[in-house]
Image: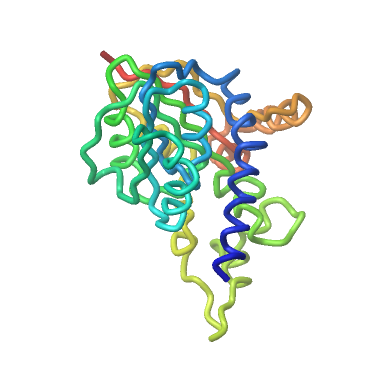
Amino acid sequence: MPEIQSAFDERRYADFLRDRFPEFWARFGGQPDFTGKRVIDFGCGRGGMVQRAMEAGASSALGIELNQSYVDFANGKVASQWDGRVRFACQDIREMEIEPADIVTSVDVMEHVMDLPETLAAVVDACKPGGEMFIGFAPLWHSPYGHHRLMKTHIPWAHLPRGNRAFLDRLVDDDGNSPASIQELGFNGAVPADFRAALNGLPVDIISARRNISSHPLKSLAMKAMLLPAIVPAIEKYVTIGIYWHLRRKK
């Protein structure tokens, strides 16, 4: 079993480096200059973002993650390469004392954060004045496939009827029980207005706040077209698939 898990972790790590890393930066128009920068990756997973940042010339990096098995993998795979300049911590960012970074990144994490205002404030605090933050997350729960493909269906929004029970009732354990809520499964269910409210008042300048961006031009056009009905507030949460913030910490 440990060998199977190790092989799985290696595949997911490789998938991040090959696919998700370039896709993430394509949604911001390209990656920043990491040269000589201290980097923090919030929700670092198996350490792929830290690996690429260090390869791109970062001076040091900290990965923060709540999954201990991911941290163990990242320490063995990534931290061991960089002679003490890389560290991974299995901690709640709200409870950490952190040396602020020049660049803070976060890939597909915020849709899982339960205490959104406090956590986002802690992420901003982890960035030094004048530093930059790149925070992207998708798919949001109310979007067509916001269940992260845990539900085997090609029908958009099929997970939402009956107060999410259409999704939850399919997840039956050996005792015949289903989860009581999506929060038990790690989905916060936050809508775009919740994310805006969490960001409001924090000491940041918004360089860009983009939605429904894909690295594939035709797919991006289709996703942007979905946003046309979003002028109706009640519809916005159903057509917003992803949010991508490029922020700068105020000096």
- The answer to whether 164 appears left or right of 120 in the picture is right
Residue 70, image x and y in percent? 46, 53
The percent position of residue 194, horizontal first and vertical second, equals 41, 40
Q: Please name whichever residue, 232 or 142, is drawn nearer the observer in this view of the structure.
A: 142
For residue 61, side relative to residue 107 (left or right): left
Residue 9, relative to residue 242: is it above or below? below
| 203 over 143 or under it: above or below | above
Q: Residue at x 35, y 32 (%)?
A: 85
Q: Is residue 125 left or right of residue 243?
A: left
Residue 39 at x, y percent in the picture: 39, 28
Instruction: Report the residue at 45% width, 42% height from top.
Output: 44
- Kindly identify the residue that appears in the image at 25 percent across and 30 percent down: 99
Q: How is the image coloured?
A: rainbow
Query: Does the rendering let one see residue 192?
Result: yes
Q: Farthest residue in the bottom direction?
A: 175
Q: Quadrant of residue 104?
A: top left
Kindly identify the residue that appears in the image at 75 percent across and 54 percent down. Answer: 155
